[in-house]
Image (spheres, rainbow, N blue to C red):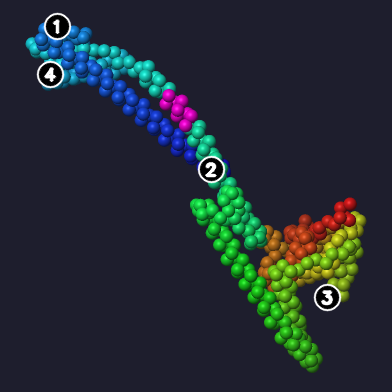
Amino acid sequence: MGLRSKLGLIFLLVSSLAILVLCVAVYTQAESSRLDRTRGLADERIKAAADTYNLNEVEVLGSQLDDPAVPDQLLEAVREGKRATFKTGSPNPKMWAAVGVKGGKVLSIVQDYDNEDASMRALRRALIIGGIGTVAMVALVSVVAAGSLSRRIVAVAGSARRIAGGDLDASAVETIGKRDGKVGSRNKDEVHALATAIDSMASSLRGQLEAERRFTADVAHDLRTPVTGLLTAAELLPPSRPSELVRDRAKVLRGLVEDLLEIARFDSGVEQADLEHIGLGAFVASAVGRLRMQQAIAPDSVVVRLTGTDATVSTDSRRVERILANLIVNGLRHGRPPIEVTVQGRTVEVVDHGSGYPEELIAEGPRRFRSGMAERGAGHGLGLTIAAGHAKVLGAELTFGAAPTGGALARLVLPPSPETDS
């Protein structure tokens, strides 16, 4: 049950209970007033009858002396010198009135008391009709009010989802303002407070991400020059095992700096794809061949398979090659060969035979400086992050999962072009 239904039901139950209590109170008060009027009338009749009897000893107004049917409670009150009235209960209620007269006798009168008086029936009918009508009207108003509140909360939730999806410029306050048709309104309630808190959180998050981006870019730029100098100096060292280690670590450090600069460019949002038409299957085969030469990879460590007809796509070949290189190197580093690269239409799948991607990476995607499970090896965790960044620039879909035969599966789906759609 949604919030709208819950609020509507609560409003309906509370209003129904309040109306029921009010109707019962009105009917009870009306019945009490009717009883009081009947008592007053009976009291006036017995008083007039007693005055007449005390003067003329004549029974008038239907009065009777020493009636044996007089209730005991009434007789007891008369014996105490009181003029009293008494109503008997169902099934045949009657209103009695009695008083002591001369000679020590008891003069009494009795009249029927109709519980189903016409005026009470009319009042009961009016209360029932009015109560049902009021409940129906309250139900309608509560549904409308709850619906309005629910829609405003849903609008705020939508803005929160947009912010969670990366749209940090989304404003929950503006969203509910537009929904209410009161942009800039000063009418601030709890929903407005919630929207303001979400906007404040988004603003703070935006500031933190911007600070992180600037820090990454500044560190990478500041390190680039000394690392280049370090690598140049390492190349001048005389041949020896220590020199080889220094050159190797300097190259790793330069690669890390270049990766950080690339990530900084992704964060800045200035990267754009340089589109060209390529045959995807042939291009992947040549890109893997170049990677084998650059990384000195054994031919049987990476296998390329083309399924179906080679598709022509409009994409940025440099970025596609960068994505493939990062996925294959990641598989060789953290998984086990052979790495199987399968091309089918606009889809490229890279599968290794290792222990597979960690569950959090499959669920949340790659994050910088998180290399995954310890058994998949060490690293800075930037390769998959960079691959995801290039895929985003291309408008492609890059997902990570588990291969049916075991191991890690990365699937790259390139966007269609007008030529491939026709």
Q: Which mark is residue 193?
A: none
Q: From the image, tell me which residue sits under label 2.
A: 146
Residue 256 versus residue 413 in the image, above or below = below
Could you tell whether 256 is left or right of 89 in the image? right
Q: CA distance from mark 3 to mark 2?
A: 64 Å
Mark 3 or mark 4: which is in front? Answer: 4
Is 34 displayed left or right of 254 in the figure? left
Mark 1–mark 4 Cα distance, whole angstroms, equals 21 Å
Q: Amino acid at mark 1?
A: Val
Q: Nearer the viewer, mark 2 or mark 1?
A: 1
Q: Residue at x 64, y 70 (%)?
A: 210
Query: Is residue 260 located in the magenta-colored stretch of the structure?
Result: no
Cα separation, mark 3 vs mark 1, equals 134 Å
* N-term mark: 1 or 4: 1
The amino acid pointed to by label 3 is Gln
Q: Is residue 408 visible?
A: no
The amino acid marked with disc number 4 is Arg
From the top left corner, tell me how far across and down residue 256 is, in percent.
Answer: 72, 77
Horizontal relation, residue 262 to residue 142: left or right: right
| Residue ID for mark 4 | 79
Residue 262 image point, x, y percent: 74, 73
Mark pair 2, 1: CA separation: 72 Å
- Label 3: which secondary element: helix
* Residue for badge 3: 295
Comes first in the chain, label 3 or label 4: 4
Image quadrant where one finds the N terminus: top right
Which residue is labeled 1 in the image?
A: 58
